[in-house]
């Protein structure tokens, strides 16, 4: 048995772990690389294994850095099944076609304005190709034994993080390999915390915040303060938000602030058809999240949902004070780019990033004080205030990861620390070695290990 790290090794994106058991190959997650160009280019490289030879994909959750490479896999001959929870499947059904659509749009835009070095620029996959992936997805329930081959089965357990997100345990050759997936917080707003696991032979654990502790301030208070500042300047507060997970948390926090009259009554828009769909799915799966039906209703009513392109364009005429929530969360694509072009040059406005910003993204550049950013081939000055709200993170911080790790009754034979920038993974490795004395590895891209 061996494992090879085809992504999320030395970086947070591109989660893809190849587990080979005798002659069978399984892929745990199948995500896109995002952020730095040197990583994004890897989306175009072929995998070290022919997709036809992969028997099954085990998908921990729907975020594109875990699922967004699935259409490429299917396009290149994968014929197996993709196992994931029912809620994750519902989210993939909207996320993957949208990812294809956005890539087609970006390629068309680059061709029209001649700013790509590739002539013509192609999408990695189209919306149609993404749709062809959906029939391969098989939905599973939490805490059940799911046979994925003759002598291998998987168990999905709650990971917190976002709706449907799972920790996955694979049982093969008398061994257990546990994949943390993206691990949620111990105290969360909209989903339950991650399930404790007590036994495993091998462990693959994420380390997005392996070197950090989240601030303890109540996110409601932080957002309330930012809204107060934006209102005083009669500016527009733009929140780039991941359509799945983050947008729902923000809507929930805003609904609570409105309910308690903690913020003035100003227009709030959710300009992301994807986030609207994700919010609908979130409320539909009421047994898999932590809100009451009333809280869900209030969350949905917190903002005006903007759907058509025309309505979205009309928002450019919006006068402050107002709040606009739009995807994507790291400003790598989507409608938020059009808002940024329009709002970033004006010092009256405020841009609030509400989650992890991967290296190389516009979000990361802006939170580090970039004076201008490039959007659709144009340099856009950043004069608006840029703020960060870290308390909404859907990822466990170092202490919370340690709390989860302490749930194991004995040390795994080997612990692989992945899904983090190098500093974060190394810091977590040190902490685990110091506190728990476990044998840890921080695998590099394409590194392979025997699991004996
Ligand atoms: Zn995630």
Image (cartoon, rainbow, N blue to C red):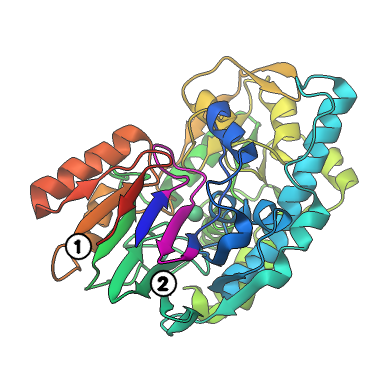
| Circle 1 SS class | loop
Q: Is the magenta region chiefly helix, strand or loop?
A: loop
Looking at the image, is mark 1 or mark 2 nearer the viewer? Answer: 1
**Quadrant of the image occupied by residue 12:** top left
Asked whether 404 or 291 is in front, the reply is 404
* Horizontal arrangement in the rendering, residue 452 relative to residue 131 (left or right): left
**Residue bounds of the magenta highlight:** 5-25
x 63%, y 60%: residue: 52
Q: Is mark 2 within 8 Å of ligand 1?
A: no
27 up-or-down from 231: above or below: below
Quadrant (top left, top right, bottom left, bottom right) of the N terminus: bottom left
User: What percent of the width, then of the height, locates residue 298?
Assistant: 61, 68
Q: Is residue 179 magenta?
A: no
x 40%, y 50%: residue: 4
Q: Can I make out residue 316 in this image?
A: no
User: What percent of the width, then of the height, locates residue 238?
Assistant: 63, 38
Classed neighbour count for the residue bearing mark 1: other residues with Cα under 10 Å, few (<14), some (14–19), many (≥20): many
User: Cα distance, mark 1 to mark 2?
Assistant: 20 Å
Contact (Cβ within 8 Å) of mark 1 with mark 2: no
Label 2, on which residue? 158
Label 1, on which residue? 412
The tag earlier along the polypeptide, 1 or 2, is 2
């Amino acid at each position: 048995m061996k494992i090879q790290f085809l992504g999320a090794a030395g970086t947070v994106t591109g989660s893809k772990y190849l587990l080979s058991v005798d002659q069978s190959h399984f892929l745990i997650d199948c995500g896109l690389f995002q952020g730095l160009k040197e990583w994004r280019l890897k989306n175009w490289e072929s995998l070290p294994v022919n997709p036809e030879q992969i028997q099954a994909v085990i998908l921990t959750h729907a975020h594109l850095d875990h699922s967004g490479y699935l259409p490429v896999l299917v396009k290149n001959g994968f014929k197996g099944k993709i196992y994931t929870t029912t809620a994750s499947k519902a989210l993939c059904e909207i996320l993957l076609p949208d990812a294809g659509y956005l890539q087609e749009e970006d390629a068309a835009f680059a061709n029209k304005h001649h700013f790509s070095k590739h002539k013509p620029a192609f999408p990695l996959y189209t919306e149609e190709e993404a749709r062809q992936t959906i029939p391969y997805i098989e939905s599973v329930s939490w805490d059940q034994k799911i046979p994925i081959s003759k002598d291998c089965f998987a168990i999905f357990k709650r990971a917190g993080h976002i709706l449907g997100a799972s920790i996955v345990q694979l049982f093969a050759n008398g061994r257990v390999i546990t994949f943390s997936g993206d691990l949620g917080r111990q105290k969360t707003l909209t989903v339950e915390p991650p399930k404790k696991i007590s036994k495993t032979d091998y462990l693959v654990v994420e380390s997005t915040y392996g070197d950090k502790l989240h601030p303890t301030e109540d996110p409601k208070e932080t957002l309330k303060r930012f809204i107060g500042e934006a209102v005083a300047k009669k500016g527009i507060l733009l929140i780039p938000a991941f359509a799945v997970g983050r947008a729902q948390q923000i809507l929930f926090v805003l609904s609570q602030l409105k309910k308690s009259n903690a913020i003035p009554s100003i227009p709030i828009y959710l300009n992301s058809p994807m986030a609207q769909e994700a919010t609908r799915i979130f409320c539909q799966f009421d047994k898999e999240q932590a809100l009451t039906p009333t809280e869900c209703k209030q969350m949905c009513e917190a903002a005006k949902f903007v759907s058509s392109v025309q309505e979205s364009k009309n928002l450019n005429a919006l006068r402050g004070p107002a709040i606009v929530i739009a995807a994507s969360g790291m400003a790598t694509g989507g409608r938020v780019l059009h808002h940024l072009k329009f709002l970033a040059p004006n010092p009256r406005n405020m841009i609030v990033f509400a989650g992890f910003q991967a290296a190389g993204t516009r979000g990361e550049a802006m939170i580090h004080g970039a004076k201008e950013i490039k959007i659709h081939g144009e340099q856009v000055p950043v004069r608006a205030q840029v703020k960060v709200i870290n308390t909404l993170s859907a990822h466990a911080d170092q202490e919370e990861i340690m709390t989860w790790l302490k749930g194991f009754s004995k040390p795994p034979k080997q612990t692989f620390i992945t899904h983090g920038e190098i500093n974060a993974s190394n810091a977590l490795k040190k902490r685990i070695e110091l506190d728990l004395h476990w044998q840890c590895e921080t695998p590099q891209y394409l590194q392979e290990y025997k699991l004996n």
